[in-house]
Amino acid sequence: MIAALLIGLIDAAGVVAATDDGDPGWLLLAGPAAGIATYTALYRYYRNTDKSHAFEHETIIEAQPVTGSDQKVDEIRGTKQKSIQGNNVRSHRERVQRVQ
């Protein structure tokens, strides 16, 4: 994409040079024009402004009420233990289940 823009700029500079009477003023305009073209091409390439989409509207998920229940098992007060008996912190497959 950038190469195509630069080739087009070189062709345009060649046309201006062929019709000019020898004044190198076109060379002063070619530098900023090439800079602007390169900046615009890089900006569009990395920002994908021409390929953007409405993420919020295309990925809408209907909210549903939270389901589940909690059961109080025990109450521990004033302990100096580092962990609670029967915790399932390490067994993530037991804690987390797939949503059907």
Image: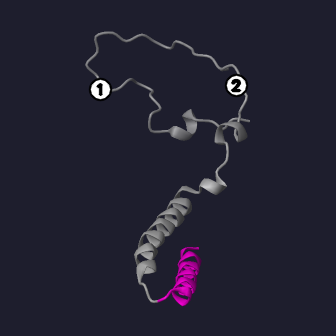
Q: In the rendered view, would you say 37 is above or below 75?
A: below
At label 2, which amino acid type do we have? Ala
Span of residues in magenta: 1-21
Name the residue located 58 percent from the left edge and 16 percent from the top edge.
Answer: 70
Q: Position of residue 94 (x, y in %)?
A: 56, 36
Q: Residues within 10 Å of mark 1 (few under 14, many from 20)?
A: few
Name the residue located 65 percent from the left edge and 20 percent from the top edge.
Answer: 68
**Looking at this view, is 87 or 29 the one in front?**
29
Q: CA distance from mark 1 to mark 2?
A: 38 Å
Residue sticking out furthest to the front = 21
For marks 1 and 2, give the one nearer the viewer. Answer: 2
Q: Determine the secondary structure under disc 1.
A: loop
Q: Is residue 5 magenta?
A: yes
Identify the main secondary structure in magenta: helix
Q: Position of residue 85 (x, y in %)?
A: 40, 24
Q: Count of labels shown?
A: 2
Q: Position of residue 88 (x, y in %)?
A: 47, 32
Q: Residues within 10 Å of mark 2 (few under 14, many from 20)?
A: few
**Looking at this view, is 94 or 54 the one in front?**
54
Name the residue located 71 percent from the left edge and 23 percent from the top edge.
Answer: 64
At label 1, which amino acid type do we have? Lys
Name the residue located 44 percent from the left edge and 38 percent from the top edge.
Answer: 90
Assess whether mark 2 and mark 1 are in contact (beta carbons under 8 angstroms). Answer: no
Please tell me which of labels 1 and 2 falls first in the chain: 2
Q: Which residue is mark 2?
A: 63
Q: Which residue is mark 1?
A: 82
Q: In the rendered view, would you say 80 is above or below 60?
A: above
Q: Is residue 56 magenta?
A: no
Q: In the rendered view, would you say 18 is above or below 88?
A: below
Q: Position of residue 37 (x, y in %)?
A: 51, 68
